[in-house]
Image: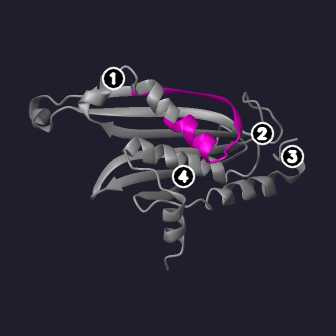
């Protein structure tokens, strides 16, 4: 049976789950901070946001929300639900590629698998949008963005793998190369 807690120990289960969000390694290009969480979606919730900065320019951002209802009164299949969003700018040639949606979705599914984030009932969308400036904004040119929104039910209250998967999704959306194990160990050993 999954370790998801019960109504009797909800506060402790949720506290441990939120603590697990702080344990994964965070790349130097990614800044994570806690933000206010939605209050009406579940009895317990927590949220973080992240920005990815490369060479001084923000290239991606996202949010991760953890919802917890130990009594199972919500419409999702389990006491926990993870909801994430990831946005990044794209080169215009990539935005027209018909495979953009499936490729972007694979960033998430691969990240969940690679980080051991066992889950079920994964769902979501990938949206691409092009913005063009007119009038006094005509000089800004066109920009294209991809946005992914997804949610899933974790099979455990240990959410560290889910946080790592979301951070990996943001890195992929930003075009950052994957970190290998020796890079992570080297960065963790720095003072």
User: Of the residues under marks 3 and 4, which one precedes in the sequence?
Assistant: 3
What whole-number distance in Å separates the C-alpha atoms at marks 3 and 4? 24 Å
Extreme residue toward the bottom, this view: 191
User: Of the residues under marks 4 and 1, which one precedes in the sequence?
Assistant: 4
What whole-number distance in Å separates the C-alpha atoms at marks 2 and 3? 10 Å
Which residues fall within the magenta stretch? 107-127
User: Of the residues under marks 4 and 2, which one precedes in the sequence?
Assistant: 4
What whole-number distance in Å separates the C-alpha atoms at marks 3 and 1? 47 Å
What whole-number distance in Å separates the C-alpha atoms at marks 4 and 2? 19 Å
Q: Secondary structure at mark 1?
A: loop
Q: Pointer 1: what residue? A: 97
Q: Secondary structure at mark 4?
A: strand
Q: Magenta stretch: residue 125 in it?
A: yes
Left or right: where does residue 60 sit relative to residue 189? left
Instruction: Indicate the quadrant where residue 93 lies.
Output: top left
Q: Pointer 4: what residue? A: 48
Residue 124 in sight: yes
Identify the residue at image location x=89%, y=50%. 8
What whole-number distance in Å separates the C-alpha atoms at marks 2 and 1? 38 Å
Between marks 3 and 4 in the image, the one whose residue lies nearer the viewer: 4
User: Of the residues under marks 2 and 1, which one precedes in the sequence?
Assistant: 2
Instruction: Indicate the quadrant where residue 29 lies.
Output: bottom left
Left or right: where does residue 134 sit relative to residue 6? left
Q: Pointer 3: what residue? A: 7
Q: Residues within 10 Å of mark 4 (few under 14, many from 20)?
A: some
Q: Where residue 169 appears, x then y in whole percent?
A: 49, 43
Q: Where residue 17 appears, x then y in whole percent?
A: 71, 54
């Amino acid at each position: 049976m999954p370790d998801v807690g019960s109504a009797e120990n909800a506060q402790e289960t949720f506290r441990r789950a939120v603590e697990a969000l702080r344990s994964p390694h965070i790349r130097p290009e990614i800044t994570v901070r806690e933000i206010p969480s939605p209050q009406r979606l579940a009895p317990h919730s927590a949220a973080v946001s992240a920005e990815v900065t490369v060479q001084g320019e923000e290239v991606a951002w996202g949010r991760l929300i953890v919802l917890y209802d130990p009594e199972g009164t919500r419409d999702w299949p389990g006491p926990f639900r993870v909801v994430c969003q990831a946005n990044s700018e794209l080169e215009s040639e990539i935005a027209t590629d018909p495979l953009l949606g499936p490729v972007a979705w694979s960033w998430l599914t691969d990240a969940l698998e690679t980080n051991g984030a066992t889950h079920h009932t994964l769902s979501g969308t990938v949206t691409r949008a092009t913005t063009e400036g007119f009038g006094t904004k005509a000089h800004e040119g066109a920009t294209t963005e991809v946005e992914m929104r997804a949610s899933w039910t974790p099979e455990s209250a240990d959410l560290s793998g889910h946080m790592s998967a979301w951070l990996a999704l943001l890195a992929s959306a930003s075009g950052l190369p994957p970190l290998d194990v020796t890079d992570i160990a080297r960065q963790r050993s720095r003072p």
